[in-house]
Amino acid sequence: IPPLNQLPFTLIMFRLPMSAAAALARRSCVGSAQLISARSRATALPTQQLVQRSFAAHTINGTATAQAVCDEVAAAVRLMQPELGRQPGLATVLVGARPDSQRYVSMKLKRAKECGFKSLHKNLDENVSQEELVAVVEELNADPGVDGILVQLPLPDHIDQKS
């Protein structure tokens, strides 16, 4: 199956009864689903019998779902800490002072703390060079207390965000 961003559109075909599929969708989990393009449907799952059914849309409580996911992650973090010997670390990098990006980063830091992560934040000037940004990411990557790095997009036009 090609990557999702290369598909003209995507269908979610559940192999589960629709009630179970709806329950999974409410929990933001599609691990038991098959994501296939409409054009490759016949070849992607030739031996499975999939029935498309229409069903009413359901309102999803995003706050409750987010809290449930955070609780699950926090439980996993508590189990991981003895093995790691420390809290997992999440670093965020913000280039510039866009209010929307500042808000997204502050929400990420808040959620990371709620989930039991140690957070580290780097705020860089909008005029930072690409080389300086890469150096900051490399510095964070070398830090043994950092397990993940999030560089908030969009980046200023003079920085190639694909590299």
Image (tube, grey):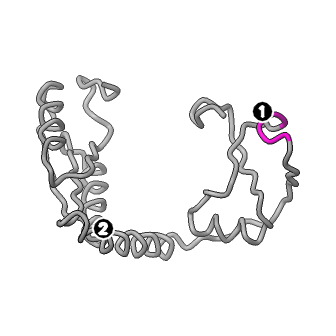
Q: Secondary structure at mark 1?
A: loop
Label 1 neighbour load within 10 Å: few <14, some 14-19, many 20+ = few
The image shows residue 153 at horizontal and vertical percentages of 32, 40
The image shows residue 46 at horizontal and vertical percentages of 85, 40
- The numbered dot on residue 40 is 1
Label 2 neighbour load within 10 Å: few <14, some 14-19, many 20+ = some
In the picture as drawn, the residue positioned furthest to the front comes out as 83
Q: Give the residue number, with chain letter if any, for mark 2.
A: 80
> In the image, which residues are magenta?
42-46
Amino acid type at image mark 1? Ser
Please check the rendered image and state whether residue 78 is part of the magenta-colored stretch, yes or no.
Answer: no
90 left or right, relative to 162: left
Amino acid type at image mark 2? Met
Quarter residue 8 falls in: top right
Q: Predominant secondary structure in magenta? A: helix
Real-space Cα separation, disc 1 to disc 2, in angstroms: 40 Å
| Residue at screen point 25% across, 31% down | 156
| Residue at screen point 45% across, 70% down | 69
- The numbered dot on residue 71 is none
| Residue at screen point 18% across, 41% down | 141
Quarter residue 87 falls in: bottom left
158 left or right, relative to 63: left
Q: Name the image quarter holding the N terminus.
A: top right
- Residue toward you, 116 or 26: 116
